[in-house]
Amino acid sequence: MEVLLIFPANMNYTIHHDAYVNSVIESQVKTISTTILKQVKDVVNVSLLGGFARGEGSVKIEKGRVLPLGDYDLLIVTSRPHFNLRINGLDELAEKFGMGHIDIAYVWKPRLSIAGKSLFWYEVKFGSQVLYGDHDLLEKIPMYNVMDIDLKEGIKLLVNRLAGMFQCYKPEFIHDKLSQGEREYMIYQTVKASLACGESLLLLIRRYHPKQLVKLDRLSKSFHSELSGYSSVNPQLLSNYEKALKFKMTPSFEMYPDELDFWFSTKRDVLLTTRFFLERYKNLKINRQEEIPEYLLTKSSLDLIEYLKFESNIFKRKRRFTNLFQRRSIYDIFGAALIYLALSTRKDGIDDHFIEKAVSIIDVLIPYKKMVRGSPLQKWRKTKEILLEIWGCLH
């Protein structure tokens, strides 16, 4: 039976309004949607999320072939609950389309009306494109404007993008030449982190918007007024944000000739932004960067849904649970340890002091001190490996 999909006439998936690019993207998204609908029989809504849904997707063209940068993000709404929904063939499609992966989120229909006050659900409601099913279903999400987003989402955004930066970084890159693929992946992940700095600041002052160009306009107007406390400390952030957005809209890896310098300067921006955000969000005064993890855990409380999801995911992977009876948010524990990993990562080597601090924090969650032995570099690698595994279990 043929699946009836909803695609608005003349929809643009990038800012360039290129008919050929639009046709390729639409064809690929249709293929993904059809694959989903053939396997999941109780789907009531499929929606495209992210940049392509907003007409701001990133692509590059190689030898006439349109290659999406990043991934496609889709949301499936089902009439029945699914606890472990698997869709076959998506990895093969991602490889065929020349992209990293295809990211599918799914939710049981009754849960839409009790969705949390997260950045994800705000983007779903105000920045998505329905491809199949009830067009008004997403109106059930109880978010009505930017004021409904929980401010802790700004910290989560920064922590997620910092984790993405460490996915693509190895200390060996300081001395060894990167391959083209490694270089492009590093630049792409670092661009996302650079954009997250500006986006989190907009969340903080309640000026966030799904559209990238609107975000740039709002950040430009508020950077030296509402955000003067930040701009006086990190004045180059606005120009860094503009450059990263230009890359996202019209990708050219030559914009960043020194990818390592870009990576380290953006790591600095992320840490400065996290510090400023925490100071405003929790009404704190943080004197030094190394105090950020301590204050991130200040007044941190357990998020039960987050905890149960994490425990379920880690049990599937490791057939074990973590230390039970956690009192703090798993995300805050992860973020604090990740920031220590970032502080330990320097151009002139690894700072073992901060690696030990990261290990101590993670050990509260997953006992693994005995696994981290050897030189500072060896301990750094193991700590990164475990942190990225924890990150995967949080999603």
Image (tube, rainbow, N blue to C red):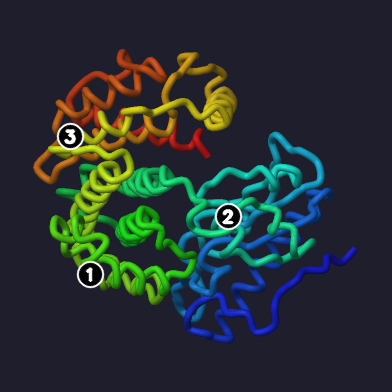
Residue for point 24% across, 18% down: 373
Query: Comparing marks 3 and 2, which lies closer to the viewer?
Result: 3
Left or right? Give the position of 76 relative to 249.
right
**Lower position in the chain sequence, tag 1 or tag 3:** 1
What residue sits right under mark 3 in the picture? 290
Q: Position of residue 124 (x, y in %)?
A: 59, 57
**Mark 1 lies on residue:** 239
Q: Amino acid at mark 3?
A: Glu
Amino acid type at image mark 1: Ser
**Residue at image x 63%, y 51%?**
142
Mark 3 falls on what kind of element? helix
Helix, strand or loop at disc 1? helix
- Residue 189 can be seen in this image: no
Mark 2 burial class by Cα count in 10 Å: few <14, some 14-19, many 20+: some
Q: Crowding near pointer 3: few (<14 within 10 Å), some, many (20+)?
A: some
Work out whether residue 160 or residue 188 is closer to the camera in this orientation and state it. 160
